[in-house]
Image (spheres, helix red, strand yellow):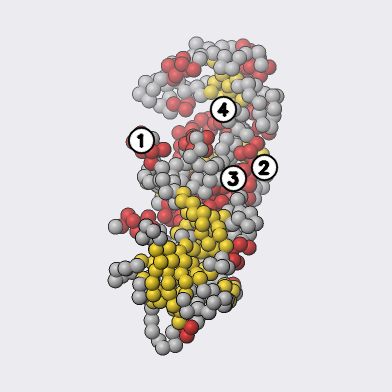
Amino acid sequence: MSETAAPKNFIRQIIDEDLKTGKNGNKVATRFPPEPNGYLHIGHAKSICLNFGIAKDYSGTCNLRFDDTNPVKEDVEYVESIQEDIQWLGFKWANLYFASDYFEKIYQFAEQLIKLEKAYVCGLNADQLREYRGTLTEPGKNSPDRNRSVEENLDLFRRMRAGEFPDGKYILRAKIDMASANLNLRDPALYRIRRAHHHKTGDTWCIYPMYDYAHALSDMIEGITHSICTLEFEDHRPLYDWILEVLKTPCHPQQIEFSRLNLDYTVMSKRKLLQLVQEKHVSGWDDPRMPTIQGMRRRGYPAEAIRDFCERVGVTKKDSCIEIGMLETCVRENLDKKAPRGMAVLRPIRVVLENYPEGQVEEVEVPNHPQNPEMGTRKVQFSKVILIEEEDFMENPPNKFFRLGLGREVRLRSAYYIKCTGVKKDADGRVVEILATYDPATKGGSSPDGRKVKGTLHWVSEAHSVKAQIRLYDRFFNDPNPGAGGTDFLTQVNPQSLVILPDARIEKSLTEAAPGAHYQFERQGYFCADYKETKPGHPVFNRTVTLRDSWAKEKSV
């Protein structure tokens, strides 16, 4: 095993014990088995990191297998996006498989179950099935078809495959125990008739295996040793084991369940995410407010930060809700180390330096990363008219306002001290221009006479900056548990989850940003160039995360 293996969790402890006893021939084989019916989200990222991480640390293998047993909801678009997401997260699969690769084998195993008198064709309709199934406190009733002969079951099942019956006419059920305390063992369905075009097999099949049945056999066929899944499948494990035991398969993977990832201020139900997309509450699956891998990628979350987050969350048997602030902390820590700095004024107001020589332009040298000299420096133009943030000026500020105000002096980052001497206002009395003087002796941002100023502002030259669209993304919901208690989760959408600033100004060097490139806009937060909409002459930047957890500060007030 790798010397840098992740800390031990209960799954790794199980694997260590298996290796110690020589189980599975000392091999470790895992798989990630998504259904291609939607885009992956941060919850899937935890499973991806776990399955691929275990395979890597134990010098084993991890397959990517698409559970494509329900053609009504599946699409090639999802197949392609899932592969892209896994690769972007930094993982490589040992083999790429589809459950549909095994349809013929899975069908033959079903015939074998019929011959073993462990499966039968049932003609109950959906309402009757619910009635016969029983409840958590009452046993179910046997189907009238439960004692069909092997010959009759085989004939009906083969005719189901041949397409002789309409959808819903028959299902193939396992013959287990209608009185079982576990409802999943009350003669569960193994096959249903469903005429739907399959993205991979076309119209070859009109019957499709159910997930629980296909999953167990697919794991077995691939020689998976540890079938790792989330806690909602814990009650399904007896069925997983029953299928493999009855068929006496050559290997029997061990199913192990762990808690799924839940984040506050987030929904991760595929149904709800699909609703957000279809009803256009978001721009698409890759909207930067979505918890999808593609949404987080577009927002600027680094893959390394997502992997770090999944490791910090850990692997347990107990469901819990993780604070999204933890994910944002991982993003900040990652970007702080590597993101070059830049200056951008999001809501600009003009400052005219009355004593600065008319027509003069200077080049101010600014470090690309103050803690990393190896990242070098860049030159930023400075001139008579600069732009600062509106919020950095108050005409009559209170004592603890350490930015610019009438008669007050501040430092411009890497440039000069300036002092406000007056303002110009529009007809409504709104300040539209600030008048100031600069101190030539303070070039570089320090004063030779030793005087100190408390405020340091970022800025851009009006004549040398470039207009950009800035998108300020925030949490999509105002409530930490959207939809709880039967509340319509759409009523809890944060109206400020996206604020578009069309007239922001950025320093000229930022126009060279490659799509997806990360920056820290000084005093603002971490941003990335939108890889979908940034075009020459039209820069678009997405706010990835603020410099500090503003929500934590808000909660503490």
The circle on residue 210 is 4
Ranked by sequence position, the earlier of labels 4 and 3 is 3
Q: Position of residue 38 (x, y in %)?
A: 56, 38
Please name the amino acid that badge 4 sits on. Met
Q: Residues within 10 Å of mark 4 (few under 14, many from 20)?
A: some
Q: Position of residue 517 (x, y in %)?
A: 59, 59
Ranked by sequence position, the earlier of labels 2 and 1 is 2
Classify 279 as above or below 477: above
Q: Nearer the viewer, residue 390 or 315?
A: 390
Q: Quadrant of the C terminus?
A: bottom left
Which residue is under mark 1?
487
Which label lies toward us, 3 or 2?
2
Please name the amino acid that badge 1 sits on. Thr
Q: Nearer the viewer, residue 410 or 513?
A: 410
Q: Position of residue 44 (x, y in %)?
A: 53, 45
Q: Residues within 10 Å of mark 1 (few under 14, many from 20)?
A: few
Ranked by sequence position, the earlier of labels 1 and 4 is 4
Which label lies toward us, 2 or 1?
1
Please name the amino acid that badge 2 sits on. Leu
Which label lies toward us, 4 or 3?
4
Which residue is under mark 3?
30
**Direction from residue 168 to residue 427 in the image, left or right:** left
Secondary structure at numbered mark 1: loop
Which residue is under mark 2?
96
